[in-house]
Image: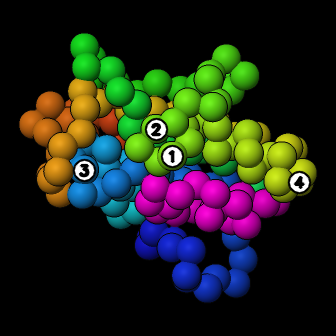
């Protein structure tokens, strides 16, 4: 299976979508890319799940989200005490949506903005998932902690996608 890119033309969308966010040149901030890369070739990936690398811009993926039965957004979240933990957030109302991040808006803020701009997205269930990172640095490589956690993170994501 191939990861979809916004420029890729496709005949029909799969019902469920996993969007990865981050900057692959900023070390652990690109953890979602590394997870998507492993999921793309994994035999356990459900056939009805499409993968999309969004880079640092979830807003550009708005059209891809329309008409889906579920959307997951995967991003790095800072927690220097516990890097490599997957956090799943269903209730975005509990999060601060106006906090600036490395992506200008937080992922939760981008989701709320998308629902304001595109009313059809209000009916699409969106689940925000964050992988905790201790910080970011200029590097195309993951930190040793996240590199070690990657196989377990992939398994946790597969379990979430199988629900």
Comparing labels 1 and 4, the label whose residue is closer to the camera? 1
Which circle's residue, 3 or 4, is located before the other in the chain?
Answer: 3
- In the rendered image, which quarter contains the N terminus? bottom left
Task: Residue at 51%, 71% (x, y): give it.
Answer: 4
Judge from the rendering whether residue 138 lies leftward or rightward of residue 84; answer left or right.
Answer: left
- Residues at discs 1 and 4 in contact (Cβ within 8 Å): no
Indicate whether 31 appears above or below 60: above
Residue 50 x %, y %: 57, 62
- Residues at discs 4 and 2 in contact (Cβ within 8 Å): no
Which circle's residue, 1 or 4, is located before the other in the chain?
Answer: 1
Q: Which residue is mark 1?
A: 104
Reply yes or no: does residue 65 show up in magenta.
Answer: yes
The dot on residue 26 is: 3
Which circle's residue, 3 or 1, is located before the other in the chain?
Answer: 3
Q: Nearer the viewer, residue 4 or 15?
A: 4
Task: Residue at 14%, 31% (x, y): give it.
Answer: 145
Comparing labels 4 and 2, the label whose residue is closer to the camera? 2
Q: Nearer the viewer, residue 133 or 126?
A: 133
- In the rendered image, which quarter contains the C terminus? top right
Mark 3 to mark 2 CA distance (whole Å): 13 Å
Question: Total of numbered circles in the picture?
Answer: 4
- Tell me if I can see residue 163 in this picture: no
- Mark 1: give few (<14), some (14-19) or many (20+) Cα within 10 Å: few
Judge from the rendering whether residue 144 lies leftward or rightward of residue 106; answer left or right.
Answer: left
Q: Which residue is mark 4?
A: 120
- Residues at discs 1 and 2 in contact (Cβ within 8 Å): yes
Task: Tell me where the magenta segment starts and ends, as one range.
Answer: 48-67
Indicate whether 107 appears above or below 54: above
Q: Nearer the viewer, residue 50 or 114?
A: 114
């Amino acid at each position: 299976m191939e990861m979809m890119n916004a420029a890729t033309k496709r005949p029909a969308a799969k019902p469920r979508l996993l969007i990865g966010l981050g900057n692959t040149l900023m070390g652990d901030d690109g953890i979602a890319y590394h997870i998507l890369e492993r999921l793309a070739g994994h035999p356990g990936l459900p056939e009805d799940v499409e993968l999309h690398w969004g880079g640092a811009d979830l807003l550009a993926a708005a059209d891809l989200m329309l008409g889906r039965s579920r959307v997951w957004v995967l991003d790095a979240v800072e927690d220097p005490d516990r890097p490599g933990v997957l956090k799943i957030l269903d209730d975005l109302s509990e999060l601060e949506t106006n906090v600036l991040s490395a992506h200008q808006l937080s992922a939760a803020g981008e989701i709320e903005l998308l629902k304001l701009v595109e009313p059809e997205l209000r009916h699409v269930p969106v689940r925000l998932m964050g992988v905790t990172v201790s910080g970011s640095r200029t590097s195309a490589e993951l930190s040793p902690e996240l590199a070690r956690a990657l196989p377990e993170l992939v398994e946790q994501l597969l379990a979430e996608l199988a629900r």
